[in-house]
Amino acid sequence: QVQMAESGGGLVQAGGSLRLSCAGSGRTFSAYNMGWFRQAPGKEREFVAFVSESGVVTYYADSVKGRFTISRDNAKNTVYLEMNSLKPEDSAIYYCNAAGGRAALFDSWGQGTQVTVSS
């Protein structure tokens, strides 16, 4: 199982940008498809973006399509989420996890990184 540590969140105005990072531990990091997920207060955790093992295949939730970009660097055991044109509704704690399609693969989660978008 891969352990993840998310970073890069913060407070940003609407229309701004942030880049999140997820550092994975373990030699098998590159063997997993990876995803970003988010959870806003009072809501269930939801899928945001997916990247395949090789980084070739990506897809996104409709709510972020065209604004967010997921990528990975297997040499650094890191997955990224570039977020542009941020909206207040993007405010949430963002997590990464190994992904099985649009679902998280592992039951355990890191601490996540808080993203707050002010209007």
Image (cartoon, helix red, strand yellow):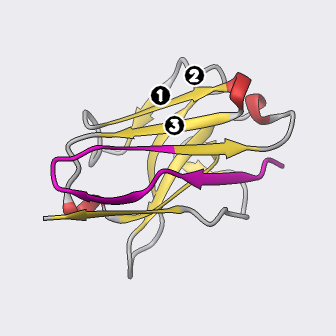
Give the residue at x 60% y 45%. Answer: 22
Task: Give the structural element (helix, strand or loop) at label 2.
Answer: loop
Q: Which-is-in-front pick, marks 3 and 1?
A: 3
- Dot 2, how many residues are within 10 Å of its Cα: few (below 14), some (14-19), or many (20+)? some
Residue type at tag 2? Gly
Q: Residue furthest toward the left?
A: 119
Q: Which residue is mark 2?
A: 55
Nearest the viewer among 49 and 72 is 72
Earlier-in-chain disc, 2 versus 3: 2
Give me the C-alpha separation between circle 2 and circle 3.
11 Å
Q: Which mark is residue 58?
A: 1
Name the amino acid, label 3.
Tyr
**Foreground disc of the pair 2, 3:** 3
Dot label at residue 113? none
Taking the spot 44% from the left edge, 56% from the top edge, the residue there is 9
Screen quadrant of the C terminus: bottom left
Residue 84 placement, left or right of 28 = left
Does the magenta-highlighted stretch encompass residue 97? no
Three-letter code, disc 1: Thr
- The residue pinned by badge 3 equals 80
